Amino acid sequence: MANALHEFINDGGKRFRPIFANLGYLAGGNRPKSEILRACTALELVHVCALIHDDVMDGSDTRRNKPAIHRRFESMHQTQGLRGDAEKFGHASAILLGDLALVWADRMLHSSGISQDEFLNCQDVFCEMRDELMAGQYLDVLEGALATTSVERSMKVARFKSGKYSIERPLHFGAALAGNFQLLPTFSAYGLPLGEAFQLRDDVLGVFGDPAVTGKPAGDDLREGKRTVLIAMTMERVDADSRQLLEKSLGNPAISDSEIKNLQQIIESSGAKAEVEKLITELTERAISVLREPSGGTTIATNVAEALEQMAIIATQRSL
């Protein structure tokens, strides 16, 4: 199990969360410290937990162009001729592996070498981040079960499932490590709109992304029945026949590639994709404006503000 988790962690990923956390620490003018960087790395392990569990909940077959963890252990069960149900074994193993990543996150933080004051300073944020992540994951599952088509509700999922724990809370974590609690409102003003834009980009890639780049099949969010802002906006714009087809297709893992292309065409021709792209741009610009005009008398180190502006572009214009 440990080897599988080690390989998964080192097999790719954007490392956004530890990067934002480290920038949050440096924002007050602090010098880089290796123990702080190790502490920030704990956030990547929380993310790994979320990815592994998310793939189980969504029934995703691949991650980063390789079998998802539950599929890897299912295959191992079959190859070795083990007893029992291979799929159930794969799911159980993945749940445990995700839990192990969460345990390792705590261990990483404990053994990072940060001071007792630094450790205590970041505890509230670390706990709140994980609470919000789990709440967001549940909201995502609930919206699929309710089959909702509300843009407002889908934005709430985007905010909690990914936005807050990907950008706002990592920045808070780093600032808290430094004891710079006065920066938290500024980081929220930057991180919340950027986090929403970050998730909206994921929503677009989940339907239109190139599998060779994203590492997941084209239209994966459609097969998984994701009730994203993109889908909600499409439902508001299409005629009754197209809406019925979308409702019938969402969450059907057996829909073909040609059917996916047809759904993509419906979404694009409705104007929903263009509207989401416009919203991504507006949210990103709102986040960047905070860096250029900080409020409340707070000041972010110039080099960090520049890096955060670059990260905003990277996070929202990516293709994976």
Image (cartoon, grey):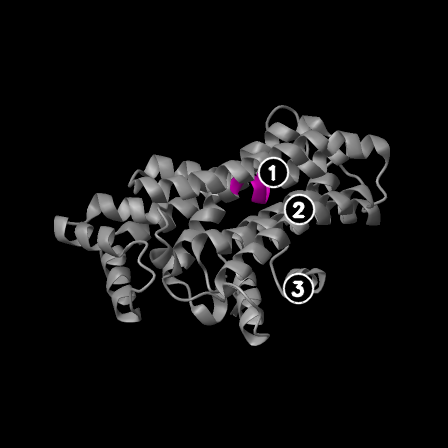
Amino acid type of disc 3?
Answer: Ala
Q: Residue at x 68, y 43 (%)?
A: 21
| Dominant secondary structure (helix, strand or loop) of the stretch shown in magenta | helix
- SS assignment at label 2: helix
| Mark 3 Cα-neighbour bin, 10 Å: few <14, some 14–19, many ≥20 | few
Label 1 to label 2, Cα distance in Å?
9 Å
- Residue 4, disc: 3
Q: Where is the N terminus found, in terms of image quarters?
A: bottom right
Residue 140 in the image: x percent, y percent? 42, 43
Residue 122 in the image: x percent, y percent? 73, 33
Q: Earlier in the sequence, mark 3 or mark 2?
A: 3
Q: Earlier in the sequence, mark 1 or mark 2?
A: 2
Label 3 to label 2, Cα distance in Å?
15 Å
- Where does label 2 land, which residue? 102
* Contact check, label 1 and label 3, Cβ < 8 Å: no
Direction top: furthest residue: 296
The reply to whether residue 285 is visible in this rendering is: no
